[in-house]
Each structure stands twice: as C-alpha cells, then as structure tokens.
C-alpha cells in the first residue's frame, strides 16, 4: 500500500489494486506475534492489538491477506442490507499531512455477498488467529435493517459495530443523537445472538456529549466503544487549519476527514470513555495513528486496541511492524 508507484494512481483505483493483491495472496506477509503483544479483547485472545478499521475491507473479500500482513483484528464493512453504488466519483481524496477525505457513500454488494465472504473465511486457517468484526449501517436509519444485518452477520463474526456516526448515515433524531443511537443499538443487540456489540462514536471534544453517548450505549446493552469516526466538514474546527481545501460536490463540501490531525481527538475520547467506563469495558481507538509512538499514546490514553486505515495508505505494512515494536518496548 505504501509502494510509491501505487500513489501514481488515483486513490480509489489504488485501493482496488491493493485489495486485488491481497485477495490473490500477493500482499505483504509478516508475523507480529511476540508474547508481549498478546491481548484479551471481547472474549478472544489476540495475537496483537493492531486492527484494520472499517472502510478498508468493505466486502470482507481479502480477510486472509489482512491477517498475513500482520493484523490481529479486522473490522469488515461497513455493510448495508442492500447493494449500493455509493456516491459519484471522485469520492476519495488524499490531502496534505497524510490524510484522506472519504465520500464513498457506503458502496457495496449488500448483505448477501458480505455474508458469503464471511462464511468462506471460516474455512480458512487464518480464521482462528483473527478477531473479526462487522461494521453495520442503514443509510435511512431503519431499525429493521439494523436488526437484519446483525442477525445475518452474527454467526460469522466475533463482534458487531454500529456505525451510527458515519457522515454518510442518516440520523433520525439530529437534535438527540444519543436517543437515536440507543434505539439503533437496541435493534442490533436484540438480534446479535449474544455477540458483543460496540458503538462507534463520532469525533468530539465535548466531555458532556461524549458521556451522554456512552451512557446511552451502555443502557442499550453495548459491550464497548469504538472512538472515533471520520470528521465531517461541519466539525472541521476541531482539527484547525491543516492546509487543504475541503473537497466539494456541486459546490457543497462533502465527506469525512481521517488522518494525523485526528490523533489528539482520538486520545481525548479514549481517555474520557475510560474514565467513565472504568477498567473493564473494551475501548477500541481509531483515528490519527501514523507511528508506533502514536499507537502507544492511544493505548496509554485508555484504548485496549487500536485500528488503522489512513496510516496504512501512506506507510504500508511497515507501520504495523513499527507499532508492534513500540508496544513490545513499552510493555517491556
């Protein structure tokens, strides 16, 4: 993924090429399984706490390749019930400072193809080595769709994540996001067949708002928190001036930012969630991790595990090795 030649391609074709290589066993291969990396999370023993964030593996089609690259966990999706073309191109942009703006629009083949790929992975020897999650979304906020997604994915994954904070997802109660998330979580938990369900929070530096969302998640039966999601244009002040002009479609700013500028927000949210939830509730930190030092900082802030996507685009598999080495040294 960090091959300079691949960056000669536009972002979306570059990602498709990387997925093709992973599907065909042509991706990087490395073992990141030092005993110091072992982590207990969501009822599973992980070889390491380094995860692939939702959005990179939308169709669950290259799972053995991600494990071979060194990941200890993968969150596949985000999956929707019906097939979607997504937004018109261009819909993915690289931005200065090792960042990306994503306006994909939740493209995919729908739940049928997604579950077929999950079932096929169950026959692979790498399945037992990987903590596997599925990120779920309903573009219309339909509770029945959330429930069906949970029911069909649950037999094949270790956990489910409600992606209620994606900039591409409609919110039924914009004036009460905690209430909306609670209702959606309840629909997922009810049909999750006792698999753990996590809530993915949108980026925030508002302690009170974070606490409202976490309280709602716990009341709805969530097992933990993922913090954080991509940052939409209307929250751009949280990352300040990062030297890029926000992409637009028909004169309107679109998409969500991910990249290095999110790290401070991610660490703040992990710390706030940990203070509120105590030591035992799982927290997965995602957003802004571009180095081993970044990963250690996020773990120290309160995360049990970290997830990557944008950092992988710019640094490739070497970033995983750097993170693993930093964690081993830190836990020393």
Image (spheres, grey):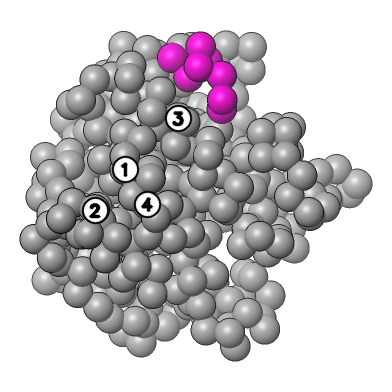
Closer to viewer: mark 2 or mark 3: 2
Nearer the N terminus, badge 4 or badge 3? 3
Label 3 belongs to which residue? 269
Q: Which mark is residue 295?
A: 4
Nearer the N terminus, badge 1 or badge 3? 3
Residue appearing at x 60%, y 88% in the figure: 5
Mark 3 surroundings within 10 Å by alpha-carbon count, few (fewer than 14), some (14 through 19), many (20 or more): many
Q: Magenta segment range?
A: 204-211
Dot 2: element: helix
Dot 3: element: helix
The quadrant of the image that shows the C terminus is bottom left
Mark 4 surroundings within 10 Å by alpha-carbon count, few (fewer than 14), some (14 through 19), many (20 or more): many
Label 1 belongs to which residue? 299
Q: CA distance from mark 2 to mark 3?
A: 22 Å
**Looking at the rendering, which quadrant does residue 71 occupy?**
bottom left
Left or right: where 219 falls relative to 39: right
Label 2 belongs to which residue? 330
């Amino acid at each position: 993924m960090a091959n300079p030649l691949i960056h000669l391609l536009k972002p979306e074709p570059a990602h498709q090429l990387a997925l093709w290589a992973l599907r065909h066993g042509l991706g990087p291969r490395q073992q990141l399984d030092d005993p110091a990396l072992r982590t207990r999370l969501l009822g599973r023993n992980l070889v390491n706490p380094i995860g692939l964030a939702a959005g990179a593996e939308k169709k669950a089609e290259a799972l053995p390749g991600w494990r071979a690259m060194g990941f200890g966990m993968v969150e596949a999706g985000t999956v929707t019930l019906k097939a979607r073309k997504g937004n018109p191109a261009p819909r993915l942009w690289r931005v200065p400072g090792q960042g990306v703006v994503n306006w994909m629009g939740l493209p995919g083949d729908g739940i049928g193809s997604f579950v077929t790929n999950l079932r096929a992975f169950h026959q692979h020897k790498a399945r037992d080595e990987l903590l596997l999650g599925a990120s779920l979304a309903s573009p219309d906020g339909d509770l029945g769709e959330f429930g069906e997604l949970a029911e069909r994915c649950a037999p094949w994954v270790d956990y489910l994540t409600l992606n209620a904070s994606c900039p591409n997802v409609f919110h039924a109660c914009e004036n009460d996001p905690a209430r909306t998330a609670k209702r959606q979580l309840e629909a997922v938990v009810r049909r999750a067949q006792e698999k753990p369900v996590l809530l993915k929070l949108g980026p925030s530096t508002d302690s009170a708002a974070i606490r409202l969302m976490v309280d709602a998640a716990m009341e709805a039966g969530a097992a933990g928190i993922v913090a954080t999601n991509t940052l939409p244009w209307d929250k751009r002040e949280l990352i300040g001036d990062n030297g890029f002009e926000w992409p637009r479609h028909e004169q309107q700013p679109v998409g969500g930012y991910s990249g290095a500028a999110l790290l401070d927000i991610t660490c703040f949210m992990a710390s706030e969630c940990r203070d509120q939830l105590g030591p035992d509730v799982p927290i997965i930190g995602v957003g802004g991790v571009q180095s081993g030092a970044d990963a250690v900082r996020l773990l120290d802030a309160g995360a049990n595990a970290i997830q990557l996507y944008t950092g992988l685009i710019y640094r490739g598999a070497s970033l995983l090795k750097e993170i693993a080495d930093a964690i081993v040294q830190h836990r020393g």
